[in-house]
Image (cartoon, grey):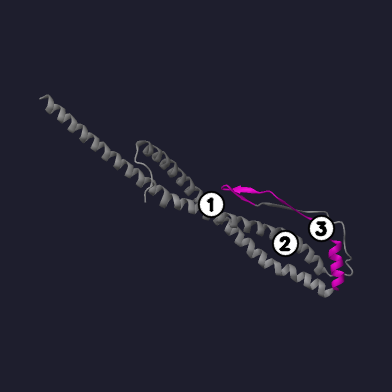
Amino acid sequence: MRLAVNPTRMELLRLRKRHVVAKRGHKLLKDKLDGLMKDFGNYAKVYREARLAVDEELPRVLKFFVLAEATSSRLITEDALELTRQDLHIVEKPRRIMSVVVPHLEITFGESTGGYSLIHTSSELDKAIAGLKAFLPRLLKMAELEQTIRLLSLEIEKTRRRVNALEHTIIPRMEETIKYIKSKLDEMERSTTSRLMKIKAQRLAQEA
C-alpha cells in the first residue's frame, strides 16, 4: 500500500531522501539488534550460573542458622545477631549497554563494633554469620544481573518491532510510492511530449 502523496517531482525528491534515511536507520537498528542479542546471551549465561550458585548456597546458609538455634536458645542467638549487626552500604552506579541503562551495584560492609559470647553460642552461629556475609553480595549481584537481562530483553523487543516496521512496512511503502510517482511523471512526460508533437505538426501543416 503506497503513501497518500501527490505525484510531483518535489515529492519524489523528498521521498527519495526519506528512503535513504530509512535504509540507513534500518541498518543501524539491525546492527544494534545484533549487538543487543549478543550481550543478552552473554548476560543470560552469567545470570544462569549466578542463579544456580545462589539456589545451591542459600539452603546451606539457612542450615547453619537452624543448627545455631537448635544448639543454643533462640534468645541467645537473636542477642548474638543483634550484637554483631553490621551496616550494608549499596551504591547504585548505572551504566549503559548499547544505549540501555542497566543497574550496577557497589556493595560494602560497615564496621562491626560488637561481639557475642563464644561460650554461650555454638560454632554453627559463626559459620552462619560468615556465610550470610559472603552470601549477600552474591544475592545482590544475581538481582543486578536479573534486572539487566530484563531491561535488555525489553530493548530487544522494542528494537525488533522498529526493525520489522521499517523492513516490512515503511520502506516497502516508500519504494512503492516512489515507483508510482515515477510512473505518473513518465506518463505525464509522454503525454506532454505527444501533445507538443501534435501542436508542432499542426503548425507545420498550416505553414505549408
Three-letter amino acid code of the residue under disc 3: Gln
Residue drawn at (78%, 72%) of the image? 66
Tell which of 162 and 56 is nearer to you.
Answer: 162
Q: Name the residue under label 3.
A: 86
Q: Which of marks 3 and 1 is nearer the N terminus?
A: 1
Magenta includes 155?
no
Crowding near the residue tagged with mark 2, few <14, some 14–19, many ≥20 C-alpha atoms within 10 Å: some
Secondary structure under the numbered disc 2 in the rendered image: helix
Q: Give the range drawn in magenta.
A: 73-102
Residue 128 image point, x, y percent: 78, 66
Q: Residue 4: where, in percent of width, then height?
A: 38, 46
In the image: residue 19, left or right of residue 108: left
Who comes first in sequence, dot 2 or dot 1? 1
- Count of numbered tags: 3
How crowded pointer 1 is (Cα within 10 Å; few <14, some 14-19, many 20+) is rated as many
- Residue at coordinates 72% horizontally, 62% vertically from top-left? 135
Q: Nearer the viewer, mark 3 or mark 2?
A: 3
Ranked by sequence position, the earlier of labels 3 and 2 is 3
Give the amino acid type for the residue marked by disc 2 in the picture: Phe
| C-alpha gap between disc 3 and disc 1 | 39 Å
| Residue toward you, 185 or 25 | 185
Return the x and y of residue 112 as percentages of the image width and height: 84, 56
| Above or below 150: residue 127 | below
| Residue 181, position as x, y percentages in the image | 33, 42
Q: How far apart are marks 2 and 1 (CA)?
A: 30 Å
Eye-nearest disc, 2 or 1: 1
Check disc 2 and report the residue beneath it: 135
